Image (spheres, helix red, strand yellow):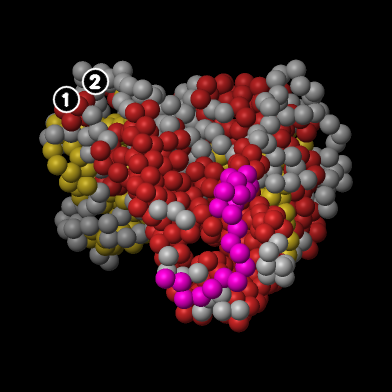
Amino acid sequence: MDTGVDHAPSLPRGVSLLALVSILLAGLAAAILPSSPTPADSAAPADVFSAERAAAHIDEVASTPRVPGTPDHTAARDYLVSALEELGWRTSVQSGVGWTTGGDPPVQRGTRVGNVIAMIPGSDPTGTVVLAAHYDTVLGSPGAGDDGIGLGTTLETARALGAGPRPRNDIMVLLTDGEENGLLGSQVFSRSRSPALGPTVVLNHEARGNAGTATTFRMTSPNGLLLDALTRSPWADADSLTQLLFEALPNDTDFRNFTEAGFSGFDTAIAAGAAYYHSPLDTPDRLSRESLQQMGDTSLSTARILADTDLMTLDDGGDEVVSLVPWGLLHYPRWVEIAGAVLLLVAVAVLVVVRVRRRDATPLQILATGALTVVTGALAAALAWLPWWLAQQVSPGMAAPVAEEPYRPGPFQIAAVVAALGLLFVVAAALRRRVPGPALTCGAFLAVALLALLGTPFPGAASTLVLPVLPAVVAVLVTLLLPADAVNRRLAVLTLGALPGAVLGVRAILVSFDAGLVAGAPGAGIFVALTFAATLPLWEPILRETSIRWSALGALLLVAVCTVTAGVVNRDGATDPRQEYLWYALDTDNGSATWASPHGPRSAWSEALLTASATPLPELFPWRADESLSHGAAPVADLVPPDVEVLEDTSAGGARELRLRLSSPRGAPAVGLWVDGATATVHGATVDGQRAEPSSDFGFMFWAPGPNGIEVTLTLSVLSDRLGVRVSDLSGDLSVVPGYEPPTDRVVVQPSVVVTRALEI
């Protein structure tokens, strides 16, 4: 029973519903109608970006995987050099060795890289604008998205820039190598940065899928001048909150090394279609031309602006926040965001005081409703993720193994939104039976205002909450000044106040799904909750007269229908071939071979191969020593193990120094060495001239060792008469396994062939 009284007559239920549906449809239209530009063909003017011309480069380089140390990788590099030289750019290949101790799982890795660098000098340079992408791929993936779209964008942007007037600043194309092995090409470039570059702005291009909006998801600070350029670029998409969320994820790009080297710039990527990420199906024909055109239009325009900007003023731009609104990018100083959060809290406080004084609600009702709003919002995020989680329990093979996403996520996305909205509606309707409408609205607004204030230390967090909700709060305050019987005017004011929340909220919900279902569905659930709060004054008359039981049943039924539909459209055989991991390991010491996978069997085919329970296999996969792998016996292939040649062996004072040559007689693109910690402790190590991190369980993987292999120098304290080591090499062609025949309805993701041997030195 209500313990407060709303003195103004309630809005009619029917017209409130009509107003609510209208603004939500307006938000949907604003989000989807201008979603991407029309791809330009090869007949487009020379000074504009053409997706067709860019795609020709992608078709050329993304016909096969480009794994460092393979002939296809070398051929791709040669093509890129040739393409840039044909444009008249001064082109070279920067060689070096990159090294990292990170990764998941952590392992020391090195790569001989060959970065492709091309330059055109400016007329009066104040610095350098760099167009960057990486050209290597993971095993088994042709990489049309990751990072073919970046290659196509940079090459076509370079061509279009060259077709126009000579720019003021120097322009560089940087196509890095070894990104997939730990951002190693950009590491080599950054540590050898030439002072002649001057102030440098990098436009980095990436992908975690094959479609969707090309979003600038992070940038350096100060960012005022950068945002001035980005805001003037067509189809630019950026949001400070996206950067905040990305920094919390384990993913990374070459941009990390660029920023640590002191460069300024942007990191831009597409992320929809993540089921194709790092898979054999990441092919040119599956790459969205609309996404390619949007990324290209944005990069070309931004590069042109920066090419004629005084880059010496980069540090004068200030630290600004950016948000995407229907008319484009809106950027403003951080103090404006903080002031907005304070203004929202003040406006809500005024509303609460007025409502309490008018006895429309009590402080306890408002506080309790606010607390419940926060809890319900968190539950909405969890519930939005639940349909996809349940589907994976029933059919694990529905999820592509790298990103854990389905090919056709649409019905799951609808189920996520309905699940979140259904929970919010049912909880709000139940609460409305116990508290008056003003308490419900004030409590929700208060929760958002307090969260916005708490979010002010994090750029973009407060703006995400303030922009959709502040107009709604102001609208409610305005209605309190209107005569009690001015129902139509109250409806008009509340509708206008809720419109920004609907427009911004619906777009945020849709954009969340670009991050997939694993991360995107919970994000969408949060934005559903925020949109619900911003439009709550229009929901209130509907809540008051709605059956809670039937609403809950209706939401459950709709979620079930969407989830079942999603299962049908993503069923085995109805989509592109399902994907599975499969690795092969040959232990030449005992002449045995093993199939392995980091995932359990996902089909009858893999069940027949992976017959044993998951356990660690450290002798076969020493760089994944602690990871449990499903496995089973495999045919023994006639493969030659890695070779270790002792070049020098000296001992003095209980220490031993070894200089070894490690190579792969079968020409595998990667080799590795691990020291048995029971026989020695490594105190110093260099690999191909690069210093490695010593440890008691020292080991590494090295890519692109070349036909002559790599030199390894070890300084050890001897714990045994003989030093035990294990060596491996790794390639990606499973056809070398006798009798291997992949099924026509499956593709193997990142196929690996590992040959190992143990020896004593």
| Label 2 vs 1, first from the N-terminus | 1
What amino acid is labelled 1 in the image?
Pro
Instruction: Say which amino acid is labelled 2.
Output: Tyr
Frontmost of labels 2 and 1 is 2
Residue for point 71% across, 24% down: 40
The span picked out in magenta is: 1-24
Q: Which residue is mark 2?
A: 740
Query: Vertically, is 50 above or below 386?
Result: above
Residue 576 visible in the snapshot: yes
Residue 1 coordinates in the image, percent (x, y): 42, 71
Q: Nearer the viewer, residue 190 or 440?
A: 440
Are the residues at dot 2 and dot 1 in contact (C-beta closer than 8 Å)? yes
Q: Choose between 383 and 258: the one closer to the eye.
A: 383
Q: Secondary structure at mark 1?
A: loop
The one of 697 and 656 positioned closer to us in this rendering:
697
The percent position of residue 394, horizontal first and vertical second, equals 25, 38
Q: Residue at x 20, y 40 (%)?
A: 630
User: Exactly how many numbered labels are in the figure?
Assistant: 2
In magenta stretch: residue 5:
yes
- Res 472 quadrant in image: bottom right
Q: Is residue 155 visible?
A: no
Q: Is residue 291 left or right of residue 554?
A: right
| Residue at which label 1 appears | 635
Q: Is residue 523 left or right of residue 592?
A: right
Q: Secondary structure at mark 2?
A: loop
